[in-house]
Image (spheres, rainbow, N blue to C red):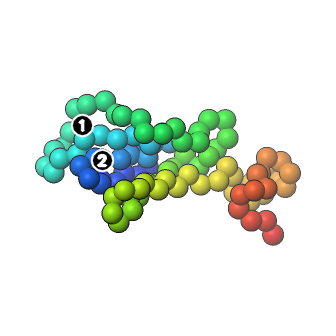
Amino acid sequence: MPAHSNQSNGTLYVANPDALVAFPYMNGRTRITVPAQKIVDLPAGDLNHHWTKDVIASPDGRKLYVAVGSNSNVGEKGYGGGDEPSRGSRG
């Protein structure tokens, strides 16, 4: 189930747990009738990677930004037990 979507320049972008995908967008349509076009893979798999993702377009519609979260909450598995020191804060 997608966590977030964004419409920009005639395209509907959907941030799925494992990939950013796109569909043609037209006002008034209530169904998607074509397969998703994968834009990019997103972190997923063995680690949590916060399965909820978010996507937003820049004001001019030229760039997309995808938030993927961190692998875990601080100290979730105990310090040194799987948290990535390069993400989040400790203390």
Q: Is residue 24 above or below residue 53?
A: above
Using a 10 Å C-alpha cutoff, classify the residue at mark 2 as few (fewer than 14 neighbours), some (14 to 19) or many (20 or more): some
Q: Position of residue 43 (x, y in %)?
A: 59, 42
Q: Going by the image, does 78 lie left or right of 28? A: right
Q: Taking 19 as reference, is 26 left or right?
A: left
Nearer to me, 43 or 2: 43
Residue at left 35%, top 47%? Answer: 13
- Point out the residue furthest to the right here: 80
At mark 2, the secondary structure is strand
Q: Amino acid at mark 2?
A: Leu
Please give the name of the residue rendered at 25% of the width and 31% of the height, measured from the top-left corner: 34
Q: Is residue 19 above or below residue 62?
A: above
Residue bearing the label numbered 2: 12
Q: Nearer the viewer, residue 41 or 59?
A: 59
Other-residue count near label 1 (Cα within 10 Å), few / some / many at <14 / 14–19 / ≥20: few
The percent position of residue 84, horizontal first and vertical second, equals: 76, 51
Q: Which residue is mark 1?
A: 32
Q: State the image quarter where residue 45 is shown.
A: top right
Q: Position of residue 55 (x, y in %)?
A: 43, 54
**Res 1 visible:** no
Q: Secondary structure at mark 1?
A: loop
Task: Count every numbered label the image shows and give the total.
Answer: 2
Mark 1 or mark 2, which is nearer the start of the sequence? 2
Q: How far separated are the C-alphas under marks 2 and 1?
A: 10 Å
Q: Nearer the viewer, mark 2 or mark 1?
A: 2
Q: Position of residue 79 (x, y in %)?
A: 84, 55
Marks 2 & 1, CB-CB < 8 Å contact: yes
